[in-house]
C-alpha cells in the first residue's frame, strides 16, 4: 500500500488547493474509491475527505424551475425526494436501479459521476490496463469481454462506464458545476466522461483537482416528466451493473413527437447519448416503426469489441422498449422493481 | 476462554412429542444480539496476525520474494516461505484419508494455481501483516496456464468425488440404444462455483507445549483433530477444535486446507497465538470449489416413453496435482428405471486449485444435466415431463435392484404438481403469456440425495432436578443443529427441550461425526438418541429392581420415559418421576453413553435416499431475454422431520441455490492466465431477495423403518437437485429455446426471439 495523507478541508478553496496536488483523490462516501484502494487498483498519496464541506448536501429548486443538486447529496435522498422524483422520474428510477439499498444510502451524486469502470482488468493490478497504467496494454481486448463496450471503444480500451444515474442525466442535458484552481465552470454531463481513444487514462474532462460541487438539471427537461423511463438489463434483479440500459423520454403532443431524449448505459466508456436517433423521432408519430428506426440509428456505429455482439442487438431492443414504455407514460408511482422489464409485475413492494 | 453456547431462552409451547415441533433456533438470540462467537471473534492475549501472500499466476514457480522488505516493515514478526517453513510430520504431498487432499503449505516454490499460498507474513497487527505481504513483491517464472478443455489434459480417474468408482454400468448401453425408438443426445456445461460462505475461512491457533487449541469454523471436528495431529506429530487428543458457530460451510470447511495449517505452524514456531482470516478473494483457490463439468447424456426411449438406455458421461475439471472429480454422472444412477445405465467420468487437469465437495457435490451439477436431458427426452416422446418421469419411476434402485428403505417420490410428484397447478400446463413451448405479455414457462425436475451415515458418539447425563446435559461434537453451520439435536435428545430422554442443555461444537466432546453429506442430524442425532436411551435404560434398571418402586418387576413388560417420568408400558398410571428413582437410589444423575453406526446388514439390503419434486415457473421478456423465476414449489420426502421450520428453511436455501445455479452463479476466469475476474460478492452473482419472489416447500410425510431408528434422512442438499433442471426446463417451455449451459444468460435466448 502506498501510505497516504488524509486531509479534511473545511472550505471548498482549501479542498481544491489540496486536491490539485498530484496523487490526490477526493473521498466522499468511498463506496468505490475505498474498494479500489483495498484491491490495489488505485494508490493515491493524498485523500481529501470532502464530506465535511458545507453546503454541498442540498437540493435547491431555482427560480427558472431547474434543480441544483449538491455533490454530497446521497443517491437515495435524491431518488426519494418527492418533487425531484415527480419532475425527473427517469433519473429517480435510474438511481433506484443502481447498486443496493445500502450503497445508495451512502453513495453521493458526485461520487456516482466519478465512479470508475467495472472492467475486471482495470481492477486487477496484475493485468495490463491502459486506463490504470498507461501504455501497459489492454488485457480485456482478447480476454473475457462479454460485457465490454460496443460503442466508442478503441484498441487501447474497451471498458464501459457503469453508472445508471449518468445515463439519465446525459439524456436530460444535465450540467456539472465544478470548482477548480482556476475558478468555477460548467461541464455538460455528456461531455464529462471521455471516450478512450489513445488516452484511456484521461477518463474525464476535469482538470487535476477540479471538483464537482453540484449538478443542475435544466427546467426544460421537466417537459418529459409525463413520458420517461429508465430500463436496465442485468444478471440479477438488484445489486448488479447493467449489461445494457437505456433512458427514453418523449414529449408527445397530438400524437406527434415534439421532443425525444435517448441515452444508453453499459455500452461505452461514457453514457451514450443517441442524438441522431432522437432527431429521427421529432415530428414523427410515436409508433413501433419509428422506435425501431430510432433504435437502429442509436446503434448504427456499434461494433463488438469481443465476445459481445449480443449487446448490440440487446441495446437496439432496449431502446425500442424504453421508447414504447415512455410512450405509455411514466408510472404513477415508482415501480417496485425500478428499471426492470418486470417492473409491472407485482410481488415486491419496495425498491430492490 | 468461555464460549457462549446456545441454550434454551424461552419455553416453547408443546404440541406433542419433542420431535416434529417447529421450534425456533436456540441460538437465534445469541446471533441477533452479536453474542455468538465466530472463530475470528477470538482474541487471546498476545495474538499475532497472519496474512497469506498468494500467487497471481496459475502455473510456474516463484523466482523471488522480497522477504527483507517485508521483514523490515514495522510490526512484521516473521515471514514464512519455502526457505524457512518448519517441517511437518505428514508429507503435504500425500493425501490424508479419508477426505484429505494434498495441501499447499510452502513445500516448494512451484505455483500450481492462482491464489495458491506462496508465503505467510505474521505481524503484530493485521495492517502490518497485510503490508508485509504486499512488500514481498513476488517475481515468477510463468508457464502457460491450462485453463480449459482445449489445453487441459484429459485422464481416466481412479475414483471420483470422495472415493466413488469412476464408472458404474448396469445392462448393455449400446444394446439399449439400438432398440430405442428415439435417442436424445446432448451436452451440458456447468461452470465452476465457489462456496462463498458469508464467514470467510478463519483460524485462531494457540499452543501450550505440545497441545494446540484451534478456533475455526469446522464441519468435521474429530476427523480434523486427527488430521492436524498427523501434520504436527502429536496425539489427536492434543488437538482441541472449537467451532460453536459457522457462518456457512457448504463443504468447504470440512476439509483441511493449506492456509490454516500454516497458521497453526506459525503459532508453534513463534510461541504466540496466531490469527488468520482469508479475504474473500483468497477463498477462490485454496479452499475448494465446485469443479466445471462437461456432461454428455444419451437417453434411449421406446414407443411408450420408457427408457431403454441412460448413458451419462461427465468430464470434470480437477487440479494438476490432485483429484476431486465432480461425480456428476452418478446422478443418473439412483433415479430412473432403465434396463441399461452407464455412468462414467473422465478428468481434466487444469492449473486450478483442487475442487472439492460443495453443497450436493456431483448431485447438483449432475442433476442439472440429467433433468434437462429427461425434459428433452419427454419432449421427443411428446409426453408431459411429469408423465414421462412417472413412466420411468424406479420401484427399486435401478442399478442394484435393492428395495428403497422408503420412497415417497410419487407423493412428492402428486402433491407438488397439485400445489403448483401443473395439470394446466400446455405441452407445447412458447404458448403461455401473462397479462403483461411476458412469456411464461413451467418446468419440473426430480430431486434426490443419498442418506449416508457417519459414525458418531454422544453422552447424556440425566439429573435428579429433571434436567439433562447432552453432549456431542456436532456442528451448526446455520442449518439448526443446536436446535434439532436438542429436540432429538429431549425426546429420547422423555424431557421437554427446555430441560435439556446441549453441549456441541467442540472436539473435546464425544465425536459428533461430520456435518456433511446431509447426514448430520441422522448421525449425531442417532448418537444422542442412543445415549438418551442408554440413560433411560439405566434409570429403568434402578427402578424395576427396586421393590419400593411402582415399577418393580416391570422389566419384562418395559417402561416408557415421558415428561420426566417412567411408567409401565401397559399402564401409564403406574410409574414415578426420574427424581424419585434417583433419590431412592442415592444418585444425583445417570450418565448414558452411546455410539451410532449404521447396521451394515440393513445398508446392504436397502437403498436409502431422500426424494423430491420441484416445479418452477419463469417469466421471460420475449424481446430482451431477461428471466425471472416467479414461482418455485418443492415437495420433499426425507423421512421423519425433526423440526419443520428448520427443514423448510433448508429446502428454501437449497432451492434458492438452484435458482443461483440456473441463472446467476459462475466464477469467471481469464482464459489465458486463469486469474479470477469476479472474486467478490459484487460481481460473483448469487440471487438477491428480489430474484426469489415465491417459494413453497411441502414436507411430504414419509415413514422409514430402515434408515435408522429415528427415521431421519437428510435435507441439507437435496433442494438444489431438481431445482436447477426445473428452472432450465421452464425457460425452454417459455421460449422454445433449449439452453444447455449454466448459468442461462439472456443472450442465450436472443437468437430465438425477435424484437417487437
Image (cartoon, coloured by chain):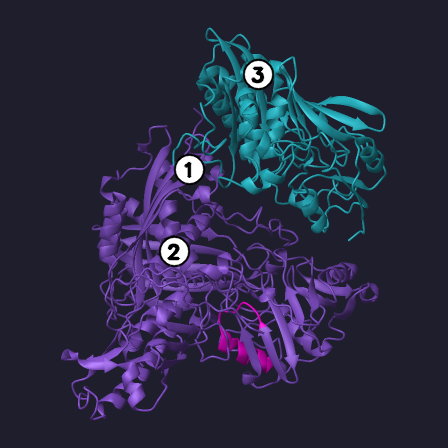
The chain coloured cyan in the image? A
Q: Nearer the viewer, residue B113 or B32?
A: B32
- Alpha carbons under labels 2 and 1: distance apart: 20 Å
Q: Nearer the viewer, residue B1 or A187?
A: B1
- Alpha carbons under labels 1 and 3: distance apart: 29 Å
| Residue B226 lies in the magenta-colored region | yes
Circle number at residue B199:
none
CA neighbours of label 2 inside 10 A, class few (<14), some (14 to 19), many (20+): some
Q: Which residue is mark 2?
A: B649
Seen in the picture, residue A91 relative to B485 is either above or below; the reply is above
Q: Which residue is mark 1?
A: A348
Residue under the point 53% across and 7% down: A283
Circle number at residue A222:
3
Q: Position of residue B568 (x, y in %)?
A: 17, 81
| Residue B393 lies in the magenta-colored region | no
Q: Chain of mark 3?
A: A
- Quarter the N terminus of chain B occupies: bottom right
Mark 2 residue element: helix
Seen in the picture, residue A287 relative to A346 is either above or below; the reply is above
Question: In the rendering, what colour is chain B?
Answer: purple
Identify the residue at the far left of this view: B570
- The answer to whether the residues at label 2 and label 3 have Cβ atoms under 8 Å apart is no
Q: Position of residue B637 (x, y in %)?
A: 28, 60
Residue under the point 74% across and 37% down: A50
The magenta segment is B215-231
**Sequence-wise, which precedes: disc 1 or disc 3?**
3
Q: Position of residue B652 (x, y in %)?
A: 38, 53
- Quarter the C terminus of chain B occupies: top left
Amino acid at each position: 500500500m502506498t501510505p497516504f495523507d488524509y486531509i479534511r478541508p473545511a472550505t471548498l478553496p482549501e479542498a481544491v488547493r489540496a486536491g490539485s496536488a498530484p496523487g490526490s483523490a477526493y473521498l466522499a462516501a468511498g463506496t468505490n474509491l475505498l474498494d479500489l484502494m483495498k484491491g490495489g487498483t488505485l494508490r493515491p498519496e493524498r485523500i481529501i475527505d470532502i464530506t465535511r464541506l458545507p453546503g454541498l448536501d442540498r437540493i435547491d429548486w431555482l427560480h427558472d424551475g431547474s434543480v441544483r443538486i449538491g455533490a454530497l447529496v446521497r443517491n437515495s435522498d435524491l431518488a426519494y425526494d418527492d418533487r425531484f422524483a415527480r419532475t425527473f422520474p427517469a433519473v429517480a428510477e435510474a438511481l433506484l436501479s443502481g447498486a443496493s439499498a445500502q450503497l445508495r444510502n451512502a453513495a453521493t451524486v458526485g461520487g456516482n459521476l466519478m465512479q470508475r469502470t467495472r472492467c475486471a482488468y482495470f481492477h486487477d493490478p496484475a493485468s495490463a490496463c491502459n486506463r490504470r497504467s498507461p501504455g501497459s496494454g489492454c488485457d480485456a481486448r482478447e480476454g473475457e469481454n462479454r460485457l465490454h463496450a460496443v460503442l466508442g471503444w478503441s484498441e487501447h480500451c474497451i471498458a464501459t462506464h457503469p453508472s445508471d444515474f449518468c445515463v439519465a442525466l446525459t439524456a436530460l442535458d444535465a450540467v456539472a458545476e465544478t470548482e477548480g484552481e482556476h475558478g468555477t465552470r460548467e461541464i455538460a454531463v455528456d461531455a464529462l466522461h471521455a471516450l478512450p481513444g489513445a488516452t484511456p487514462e484521461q477518463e474525464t474532462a476535469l482538470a487535476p483537482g477540479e471538483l464537482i460541487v453540484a449538478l443542475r438539471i435544466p427546467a426544460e427537461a421537466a417537459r418529459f416528466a409525463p413520458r420517461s423511463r429508465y430500463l436496465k438489463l442485468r444478471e440479477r434483479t438488484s445489486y448488479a451493473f447493467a449489461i445494457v440500459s437505456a433512458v427514453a423520454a418523449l414529449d408527445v403532443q397530438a400524437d406527434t413527437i415534439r421532443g425525444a431524449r435517448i441515452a444508453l448505459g453499459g455500452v461505452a466508456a461514457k453514457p451514450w447519448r443517441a442524438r441522431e436517433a432522437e432527431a429521427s423521432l421529432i415530428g414523427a408519430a410515436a409508433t413501433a416503426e419509428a422506435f425501431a428506426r430510432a433504435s437502429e440509428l442509436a446503434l448504427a456505429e456499434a461494433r463488438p469489441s469481443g465476445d459481445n455482439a449480443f449487446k448490440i442487438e440487446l441495446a437496439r431492443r432496449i431502446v425500442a422498449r424504453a421508447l414504447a414504455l415512455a410512450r405509455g407514460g411514466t408510472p404513477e408511482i415508482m415501480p417496485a422493481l425500478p428499471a426492470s422489464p418486470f417492473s409491472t409485475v407485482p410481488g415486491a413492494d419496495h425498491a430492490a | 476462554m468461555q464460549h457462549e453456547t446456545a441454550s434454551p431462552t424461552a419455553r416453547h409451547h408443546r404440541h406433542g412429542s419433542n420431535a416434529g415441533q417447529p421450534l425456533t433456533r436456540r441460538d437465534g438470540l445469541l446471533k441477533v444480539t452479536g453474542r455468538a462467537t465466530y472463530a475470528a471473534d477470538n482474541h487471546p492475549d498476545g495474538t499475532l496476525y497472519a496474512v497469506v501472500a498468494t500467487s497471481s499466476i496459475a502455473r510456474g514457480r516463484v523466482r523471488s520474494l522480497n522477504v527483507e522488505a517485508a521483514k523490515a516493515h514495522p510490526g512484521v514478526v516473521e515471514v514464512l516461505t519455502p526457505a524457512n517453513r518448519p517441517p511437518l510430520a505428514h508429507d503435504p504431498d500425500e493425501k490424508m484419508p479419508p477426505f484429505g487432499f494434498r495441501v499447499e503449505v510452502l513445500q516448494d516454490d512451484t505455483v500450481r494455481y492462482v491464489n495458491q499460498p506462496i508465503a505467510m507474513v505474521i505481524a503484530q497487527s493485521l495492517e502490518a501483516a497485510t503490508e508485509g505481504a504486499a512488500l514481498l513483491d513476488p517475481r515468477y517464472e510463468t508457464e502457460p496456464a491450462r485453463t480449459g478443455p482445449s489445453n487441459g489434459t484429459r485422464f481416466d480417474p481412479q475414483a471420483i468425488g470422495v472415493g466413488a468408482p469412476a464408472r458404474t454400468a448396469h445392462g448393455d448401453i449400446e444394446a439399449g440404444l439400438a432398440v430405442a425408438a428415439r435417442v436424445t443426445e446432448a451436452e451440458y456445461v456447468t461452470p465452476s462455483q465457489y462456496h462463498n460462505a458469508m464467514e470467510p475461512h478463519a483460524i485462531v491457533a494457540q499452543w501450550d507445549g505440545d497441545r494446540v487449541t484451534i478456533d475455526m469454523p469446522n464441519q468435521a471436528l474429530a476427523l480434523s483433530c486427527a488430521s492436524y495431529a498427523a501434520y504436527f506429530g502429536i496425539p489427536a487428543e492434543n488437538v482441541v477444535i472449537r467451532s460453536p458457530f459457522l457462518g456457512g460451510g457448504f463443504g468447504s470447511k470440512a476439509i483441511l486446507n493449506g492456509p490454516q495449517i500454516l497458521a497453526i505452524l506459525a503459532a508453534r514456531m513463534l510461541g504466540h497465538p496466531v490469527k488468520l482470516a482469508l479475504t474473500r478473494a483468497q477463498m477462490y483457490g485454496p479452499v475448494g470449489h465446485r469443479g466445471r463439468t462437461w456432461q454428455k447424456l444419451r437417453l434411449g426411449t421406446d414407443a411408450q416413453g420408457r427408457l431403454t438406455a441412460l448413458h451419462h458421461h461427465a468430464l470434470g475439471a480437477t487440479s494438476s496435482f490432485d483429484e476431486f472429480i465432480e461425480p456428476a454422472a452418478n446422478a443418473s444412477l439412483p433415479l430412473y428405471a432403465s434396463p441399461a445405465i452407464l455412468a462414467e467420468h473422465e478428468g481434466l487437469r487444469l492449473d486450478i486449485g483442487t475442487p472439492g465437495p460443495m453443497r450436493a457435490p456431483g448431485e447438483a451439477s449432475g442433476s442439472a444435466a440429467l433433468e434437462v436431458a429427461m425434459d428433452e427426452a419427454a419432449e421427443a416422446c411428446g409426453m408431459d415431463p411429469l408423465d414421462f418421469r412417472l413412466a420411468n419411476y424406479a420401484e427399486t434402485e435401478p442399478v442394484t435392484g435393492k428395495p428403497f428403505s422408503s420412497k415417497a417420490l410419487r407423493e412428492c410428484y402428486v402433491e407438488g404438481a397439485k400445489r403448483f397447478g401443473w395439470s394446466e400446463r400446455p405441452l407445447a413451448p412458447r404458448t403461455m403469456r401473462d397479462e403483461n405479455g411476458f412469456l411464461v414457462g413451467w418446468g419440473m425436475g426430480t430431486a434426490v440425495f443419498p442418506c449416508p451415515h457417519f459414525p458418531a458418539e454422544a453422552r447424556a447425563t440425566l439429573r435428579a432436578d429433571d434436567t439433562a446435559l447432552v453432549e456431542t461434537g456436532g456442528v451448526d453451520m446455520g442449518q439448526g443443529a443446536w436446535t434439532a439435536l436438542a429436540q432429538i435428545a429431549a425426546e429420547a430422554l422423555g424431557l421437554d427441550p427446555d430441560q435439556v442443555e446441549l453441549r456441541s461444537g467442540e472436539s473435546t466432546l464425544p465425536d459428533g461425526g461430520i456435518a456433511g453429506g446431509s447426514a448430520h442430524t441422522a448421525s449425531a442425532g442417532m448418537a444422542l438418541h442412543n445415549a438418551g436411551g442408554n440413560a433411560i435404560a439405566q434409570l429403568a434398571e434402578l427402578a424395576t429392581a427396586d421393590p419400593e418402586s411402582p415399577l418393580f418387576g416391570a422389566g419384562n413388560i418395559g417402561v416408557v420415559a415421558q415428561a420426566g417420568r417412567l411408567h409401565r408400558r401397559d399402564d401409564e398410571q403406574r410409574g414415578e418421576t426420574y427424581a424419585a428413582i434417583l433419590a431412592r437410589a442415592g444418585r444425583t444423575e445417570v450418565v448414558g453413553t452411546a455410539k451410532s453406526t449404521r447396521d451394515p446388514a440393513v445398508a446392504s439390503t436397502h437403498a436409502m435416499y431422500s426424494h423430491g419434486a420441484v416445479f418452477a415457473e419463469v417469466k421471460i421478456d420475449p424481446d430482451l431475454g431477461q428471466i425471472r423465476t416467479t414461482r418455485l414449489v418443492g415437495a420433499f420426502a426425507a423421512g421423519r422431520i425433526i423440526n419443520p421450520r428448520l427443514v423448510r428453511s433448508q429446502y428454501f436455501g437449497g432451492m434458492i441455490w438452484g435458482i443461483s445455479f440456473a441463472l446467476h452463479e459462475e466464477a469467471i476466469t481469464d482464459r489465458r492466465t486463469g486469474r479470477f475476474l469476479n472474486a467478490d460478492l459484487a460481481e460473483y452473482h448469487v440471487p438477491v431477495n428480489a430474484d426469489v419472489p415465491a417459494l413453497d416447500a411441502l414436507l411430504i410425510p414419509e415413514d422409514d423403518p430402515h434408515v435408522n431408528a429415528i427415521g431421519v434422512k437428510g435435507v441439507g442438499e437435496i433442494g438444489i437437485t431438481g431445482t436447477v433442471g426445473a428452472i432450465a426446463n421452464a425457460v425452454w417451455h417459455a421460449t422454445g429455446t433449449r439452453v444447455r449451459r449454466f448459468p442461462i444468460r439472456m443472450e442465450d435466448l436472443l437468437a430465438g426471439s425477435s424484437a417487437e
